[in-house]
Image: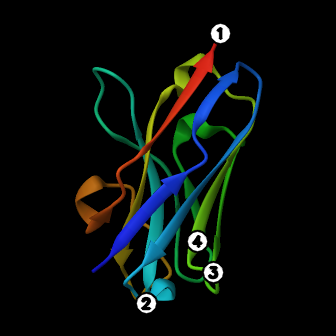
Amino acid sequence: QVQLVESGGGLVQAGGSLRLSCAASGLTFYNYAMAWFRQAPGKEREFVAGISGVGSTYYGDFVKGRFTISRDNIKNTVSLEMNSLEHADTAIYYCAADLSYSDYAGRALWEYEYWGQGTQVTVSS
């Protein structure tokens, strides 16, 4: 049974930083592309960042160099380092996994088979 468990969310002031983590179990981790999505109140879930099994990274246009995604294929974790946070970054952040044998991480929700429960990030302005 695949489980994705996010942690690290919380309340931070604008301009601050947070590090989100996602612990994966029940899968052969390096065979999965991993991604972070987010959903703000009243908005659709959107792609934040993705990383292939071998470490190629992809980011949403709004990231603009502020976030960094990384993974540890030994510990079965994926992290999202977020800097220069803005009020607009307030959302629930979800970890997702996609079985992929290629060096690719998709940007679409439908590409990901497994999802975590999410962690709330609130940025005060």
Q: Position of residue 74 (x, y in %)?
A: 64, 86
Q: Is residue 78 above or below residue 47?
A: below
Under tag 4, what secondary structure? Answer: strand
Q: CA distance from mark 1 to mark 4?
A: 30 Å
Relative height, residue 21 to residue 10 (above, below):
below
Q: Residue 89: which quarter of the image?
A: top right
Regarding residue 53, the answer to whether it shows in the image is: yes
According to the image, label 3 marks what residue?
75
Sequence-first disc among 1 and 4: 4
Q: Are marks 1 and 4 in contact (CB under 8 Å)?
A: no
Residue 77: numbered disc = 4
Inspect the image, locate mark 4, and give the three-letter code of the amino acid beneath it.
Thr
Q: Identify which residue is drawn at 56% across, 79% down.
A: 76
Q: Is residue 71 left or right of residue 121?
A: right
Given the image, on which type of amino acid does mark 2 rest?
A: Thr
- Labels 3 and 4 touching (C-beta < 8 A): yes
The secondary structure type at the circle numbered 3 is loop
The residue that disc 2 covers is 28
Cα distance between the residues tagged 1 and 3: 35 Å
Give the label on residue 125, or none: 1
Measured as percent of width and height from the top left, residue 44 is found at 28, 33
SS assignment at label 1: loop
Nearest the camera: 56 or 94?
A: 94
Going from the N terminus, do you reach mark 3 or mark 2 first? 2
Residue at image position (27%, 80%) is 1
Regarding residue 112, the answer to whether it shows in the image is no
Question: Identity of the amino acid at label 3?
Answer: Lys
Instruction: Give me the disc on residue 2.
Output: none
Tag 1–tag 2 contact (CB < 8 Å): no
